[in-house]
Amino acid sequence: MNTASENPRWLTDEEQRVWRAYLHATTLLEDHLDRQLQRDAGMPHVYYGLLVGLAEAPRRRLRMTELAMKAKITRSRLSHAIARLEKNGWVRREDCPSDKRGQFAVLTDEGLTVLERTAPGHVGAVRQAVFERLTPEQQKSLGEIMQIVAEGLQPNEAGADLPWLR
């Protein structure tokens, strides 16, 4: 029986070029956005994403499990992030009345103010780093490609090893 480790199917030169370009770009982009958000708001990019997720939710609140799924992070990482955001006064936790084990994360008024103040600079950084460099056709292709990759990494079957289930 041949397994992938016994008989690997190596990347072609072109696949290797594409893969390394992707790694290079995503590493630089994440660093660029993290530095912008640290400078402007004293928070990493993942925290900004959590605030956005809460701001977009009804009544600015989500169950912690739903927020972890939306942010694509482990529950442990979410718990740590929410603790930091609570310390800043930007988020508060509320117990779930229908589930004694469940909790909600709620975006506070102060958190919404920070988000509203930070969003223009962040959007500008995203626009400058990504969208101003691509034609409309390239933007469409990039979106389609990333959707295909994301869907392939999020199987629907029970027992899938996804960050928010860990």
Image (cartoon, rainbow, N blue to C red):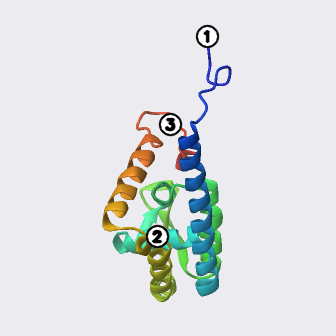
Crowding around mark 3 (Cα neighbors within 10 Å: few <14, some 14 to 19, many 20+) is: few
The circle on residue 1 is 1
Gap between marks 3 and 2 measured at Cα: 31 Å
Disc on the earlier residue, 1 or 3: 1
The residue mark sitting in front, 1 or 2, is: 2
Q: Which residue lies furthest to the front in this view?
A: 13
Q: Position of residue 33 (x, y in %)?
A: 57, 73
- Tag 1–tag 2 contact (CB < 8 Å): no
Above-or-below relation of 50 to 71:
below
- Tag 3–tag 2 contact (CB < 8 Å): no
Above-or-below relation of 58 to 158:
below
Q: Where is residue 70 in the image (x, y as percent from the top left)?
A: 45, 58
The residue mark sitting in front, 1 or 3, is: 1
Amino acid type for the residue under numbered disc 3: Ala
Gap between marks 1 and 2 measured at Cα: 45 Å
What residue did someone put label 3 on? 160
Q: Is 101 left or right of 61, judged from the image as shown?
A: right
Above-or-below relation of 81 to 154:
below
- 142 vs 102, nearest the viewer: 142
Amino acid type for the residue under numbered disc 2: Val
What residue did someone put label 2 on? 130
Disc on the earlier residue, 3 or 2: 2
For the image, the number of numbered tags is 3
Crowding around mark 2 (Cα neighbors within 10 Å: few <14, some 14 to 19, many 20+) is: few
